[in-house]
Image (cartoon, rainbow, N blue to C red):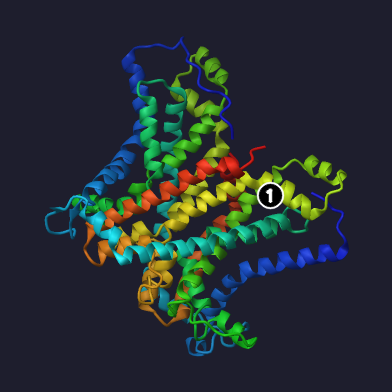
Amino acid sequence: MRDTRSLPAKLALYVAVLVGAAIMLFPFLWTVITSITPEGSLADGPKLVVENPTLDAYRTLLDAIPMWRIILNSLGIAIASTALQLVTGSMAAYGFARLHFPLKNVVFGFYLATLMVPLQVLVVPLFIEMKTFNLQDTYFALLAPTIASAFGVFLLRQAVTAVPMELDEAATIDGAGHLRIFTTIVLPLIRPALATVAVFAFMGSWNSFLWPLVVIRSPEFMTLPLGLSTLQGQFTTQWDVVMAGSVVSIVPIAIVYLLAQRHIIAGVAHTGIK
Amino acid sequence: MKANATPVRTKTRKPGGWKRLGWVLFFLLPSAIPLFVFTLVPMVSSLWVSLHKWNLISPMEWVGLGNYRNLLTDEMTRRVFLHTLIYVAGYLPIVYAGGLCLALALNQKLKGRAFLRATYFLPVVTSWVVVALVWKWLLNPTNGLVNQVLGAIGLPEPGWWTDPHWALPAVILSSAWKDLGFVMVILLAGLQAIPSDIYEAAKVDGSSAWQRFWRVTLPLLSPSTFFVVVISLINGFQVFDQVYVMTAGGPSGSSQVVVGQIYDLTFRYGRAGEASALSWILFAVILLITVVQIRGQRRWVHYA
């Protein structure tokens, strides 16, 4: 980091980054503005300063789809899927890094194979699987493909491998079994990797669209992305309502983001340097 | 992250074989069962379905490689791959160049750096559907903000998602806007990993800032660049959400992408066999591109 720049150069830099920030933030502001603009004055586009702000669009929205329930669905599924992936992933990571068993590499190879296959390949048979067991349109169907993630196992295994073996051995001498070693030694030491996996699991579930689109029909099981996309079909030209829905679905994740912003960004940056 | 401690066989621990197997099952089954049932089984059955003619309802009819043969000669397959390719070719340079500029700027001593970084990253945590809806509104041909601004400064106002020529650019633009912050964070982490004494040494040797950028920054950033390129290509070829929401593949199929075609084949036209075959073709393409990149990385990626 150098600080030997001339004043004009510095000024130009500030102007550039602020213009960038404006480009990133303005669409969000415009979404809010549109959502409180009376429907009648949308024809020539909303104005920056809304003349008669109204919450009508939000009322229409809440009448049209069970928005609160959809938000809770999204949150619940995202939290459940994150928790499950952390548990299943860290356990598998310990198994692969610390236990010895025949054909370990073959088993790990199968895990890696599932990592490479994109969701689109799985969507059709997965849908049929759910249909066969009459599970379509349930929370379980939403959750099923995200109970375990090979990506998480892979990342966490790297982290467990980096934990010095001597710690395990010392604990073994003290009479600790695998469960004790796993919970009291390994888990606390791989917290950064767990945080990274948590970030990706949560964002993956929160943003997931294709699978819910395929497997969910009734509004009461919809997640936010799906609910919003059906909204667009219902209110093709009522942009105030569509934008109200967008605002409502941005707010919860924006709050999570503001609270955990540093960890989220660190988690994402972490995957890039391997 | 480095794997600096490979597991050492502990010869002291050898209680009964069954007990050991018990521990293996205890630690592995919670992930192995769901991965088997919800990934491996569908994977195999997807291959099976791809060899049949099937509309999801009536019994399957064996066609062997017929689906693959039909798809490879079908004009529509060529079109959806072309559109996907155009998407990737438009999206990647924009996010990379934009993300690099932002990362370089934020790597300077700036007031409010944390705030700026958080702002640029905000679209990354927003879902694709929201981003697509917001941009569909911004790019609305009649009363959208972008066209109002373009009109005010006397520029032509494109029809964006209502115009076959502008539908893909509209999707590219909104996707790049969403992912800029992601690329910036990865590249910023890469920039910060470059030791500052290399810059000092280059400065002592009398290099210009421009030379330092090309000779020091870019080469030492190449591992991060590689990561961004690999991930962007994998994700880019699977583009779906934003296309489905913004254009649904239209107008008249002008922005239909591969995954959109898989979805439509299955759920609109009842051609699940062909859809499965197409998904495997897509997988093969992604795998091939990724392998080529990993092979080719030796030529341009420098690990410090």
The answer to whether residue A198 shows anywhere in this view is yes
The answer to whether residue B134 shows anywhere in this view is no
Chain of the residue under the numbered disc 1 shown in the image:
B
Residue tagged 1: B218
Residue A163 to residue B80: above or below: above
Depth check: give the residue in front, A9 or A161.
A9
Left or right: A100, with A136 as reference point: right
Depth check: give the residue in front, A56 or A119.
A119
User: Residue A47, percent across and down?
Assistant: 60, 85
Residue beneath the point at 25% across and 67% down: B268
Residue A64 to residue B94: above or below: below
Residue B119 to residue A235: above or below: above
Residue beneath the point at 35% across and 50% down: A143
Answer with the quarter of the image where residue A68 lies.
Answer: bottom left
SS class of the residue under badge 1? Answer: helix
Question: At label 1, which amino acid type do we have?
Answer: Leu
User: Residue A236, percent across and down?
Assistant: 39, 80
Left or right: B11, with B22 as reference point: right
Answer with the quarter of the image where residue B111 lies.
Answer: bottom right
